[in-house]
Amino acid sequence: MREIAIYSAIGLWGVVLLCLSVVTIRYRITARWLVISWMGLPVRWLRLTNIGQITVQRRFWVERWHNSLSPGNRYLLLEKKFGLLCRHLAITPRNHLIFKAELEAARQHRLNAIAAASRDAPTEMPRTSAPSPTSR
């Protein structure tokens, strides 16, 4: 009977620690990605070019990555351009409006870099001057 109490106490502490580990979710913006990490380990990457729109609206069927036990009004909704199951991702950064501005700026910078790279790339490959069998 004592062993059951010990194992259930250990299990209860494990569940409590897992629930409290929600506050260890962090968001980081890189040159190409929005990286969501949990306890220092990256668990979700979202391409900046895949983000269609960033709003503060609430939706029911979303992929939730809250980093607080009561997110309140720190809610940001990222609408993805592509996705099989969930095309919306909800995050709750500490300063959500500042994070939204930084994310939009990084996204626009990435889109401009892609557009500049596609402008500079040659549109046609140069043809070799091999004789054609019909050009005699």
Image: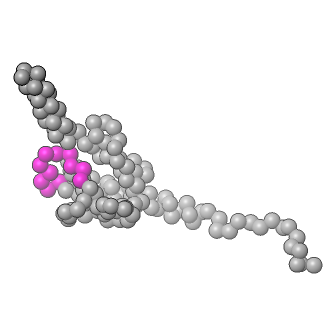
| Image coords of residue 60 (percent x, y) | 19, 63
Measured as percent of width and height from the top left, residue 21 is found at: 20, 38
Residue plotted at (27% across, 53% down): 99
In this rendering, the answer to whether 11 lies above or below 122 is above
Looking at the image, which residue is at 7% across and 21% down? 2
Of the 4 image quadrants, the one containing the C terminus is: bottom right
**21 left or right, relative to 109:** left
Res. 5 image quadrant: top left
Measuring 45% from the left and 61% from the top, which residue is drawn there?
111
Q: Which residues are magenta?
A: 64-74
The structure's colour scheme is one colour
- Residue 2 falls inside the magenta stretch: no
Residue 7 versus residue 81 in the image, above or below: above
Task: Kindly identify the residue that appears in the image at 57 percent across and 65 percent down.
Answer: 119
Pick the quarter of the image with the N terminus. Answer: top left
Residue 98 visible in the current orientation: no
**Relative to 23, does residue 48 appear above or below in the rendering?**
below
43 and 10: which is toward the camera:
10
When asked about the image quadrant of residue 75, the answer is bottom left
Q: Seen in the image, is 69 located left or right of residue 131?
A: left
Q: How many marks?
A: 0
